[in-house]
Structure formats: structure tokens, C-alpha cells
């Protein structure tokens, strides 16, 4: 069980962020379209969520669903890596929820120099390892 390096983590982050951005952008445009249609129809619902709110919601849901079902995200599929707990097995649902929630913080990645891993890995007691 070999832990992946920083380069692989960056690749995972970039691929997953692009996927999350595309999904968030599509949902944002759909939400704006619905708000405009309700306004045209005379319904008092003309509020739509801003892109940032949708992005962070999609980020949480994307990581949670992908890591609960596959223990991998699109970036991890591309880089042949997966999330494991300390025993080398799939993380449980609680660990995945912690990972997903901590990712919402801005300071998550700044813990790499101090902990040798991201904050979401440290708090959830998980690692990202290469697939054999």
C-alpha cells in the first residue's frame, strides 16, 4: 500500500475540480433559467442561487457519493489511486462525510507541509494510495 505523492494529489484535485465546475455551471444556468421562467409566468419566485453556493453543494455531494460508492473520484480513476482507511480497507460513511465536509474549508490544502497530508485525510484518518 503505497501512498500517492503530491503530484498525483494535484492531478486528482484538478480533474475533480473541472468535473465539479462543469456540473455546477450547468446547474447554475438551469437554476437561473427556472427563475426567469417563473418570473415571466408571474409567479413570485424569482430567486436563484449564486454559483458559489451551487459549487460548494456539488463539491460536497460529488465527493460524498463517489467515495462512498467507489472509494474513488474521477481524478482518482485517472491516476489509479483510491481512498483507504488505516487498515487499508474502504473508508466508512462517517469517514467519507468528514472528508467531504473538511474539503469545504479554505485551509484544507495548507496542512500538507505540517502533516504530510491534507487536513481532510488527517481528520478522517484516511489515505490516498496507489492501486496495485
Image (cartoon, rainbow, N blue to C red):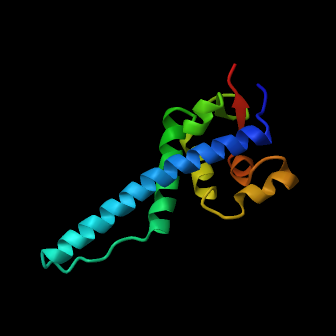
Task: Return the x and y of residue 96 as percentages of the image width and height.
Answer: 58, 45
Task: Return the x and y of residue 62 as percentages of the image width and height.
Answer: 49, 47
Q: Quarter of the image for the N terminus: give it.
A: top right
4 vs 45: above or below: above
When asked about the image quadrant of residue 119, the answer is bottom right
Q: Residue furthest right?
A: 114
Report whether 20 appears left or right of 91. left
- Give the residue drawn at x 43%, y 51%: 23
Q: Quarter of the image for the C terminus: give it.
A: top right
Task: Return the x and y of residue 4 as percentages of the image width and height.
Answer: 76, 34
46 vs 11: above or below: below
- Give the residue drawn at x 59%, y 43%: 15
Q: Nearer the viewer, residue 36 or 87?
A: 36
42 vs 118: above or below: below
Report whether 117 appears left or right of 32. right
Q: Residue furthest top?
A: 132
Look at the image and tell me whether residue 39 can be seen: yes
Look at the image and tell me whether residue 60 can be seen: no
Report whether 65 appears left or right of 124. left
Label total for image = 0
- Give the residue drawn at x 51%, y 61%: 56
When asked about the image quadrant of residue 30, the answer is bottom left
- Give the residue drawn at x 19%, y 81%: 44
Q: Nearer the viewer, residue 131 or 78?
A: 78
Task: Return the x and y of residue 18 as percentages of the image width and height.
Answer: 54, 49
Amino acid at each position: 500500500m503505497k501512498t500517492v505523492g503530491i503530484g498525483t494529489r494535484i492531478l486528482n484535485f484538478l480533474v475533480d475540480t473541472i468535473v465539479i465546475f462543469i456540473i455546477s455551471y450547468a446547474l447554475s444556468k438551469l437554476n437561473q433559467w427556472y427563475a426567469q421562467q417563473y418570473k415571466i409566468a408571474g409567479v413570485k419566485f424569482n430567486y436563484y442561487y449564486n454559483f458559489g453556493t451551487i459549487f460548494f453543494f456539488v463539491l460536497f455531494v460529488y465527493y460524498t457519493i463517489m467515495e462512498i460508492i467507489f472509494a474513488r473520484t474521477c481524478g482518482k480513476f485517472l491516476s489509479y489511486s483510491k481512498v483507504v482507511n488505516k487498515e487499508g480497507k474502504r473508508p466508512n460513511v462517517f469517514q467519507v462525510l468528514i472528508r467531504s465536509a473538511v474539503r469545504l474549508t479554505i485551509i484544507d490544502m495548507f496542512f500538507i507541509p505540517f502533516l504530510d497530508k491534507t487536513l481532510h485525510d488527517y481528520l478522517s484518518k484516511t489515505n490516498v494510495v496507489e492501486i496495485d
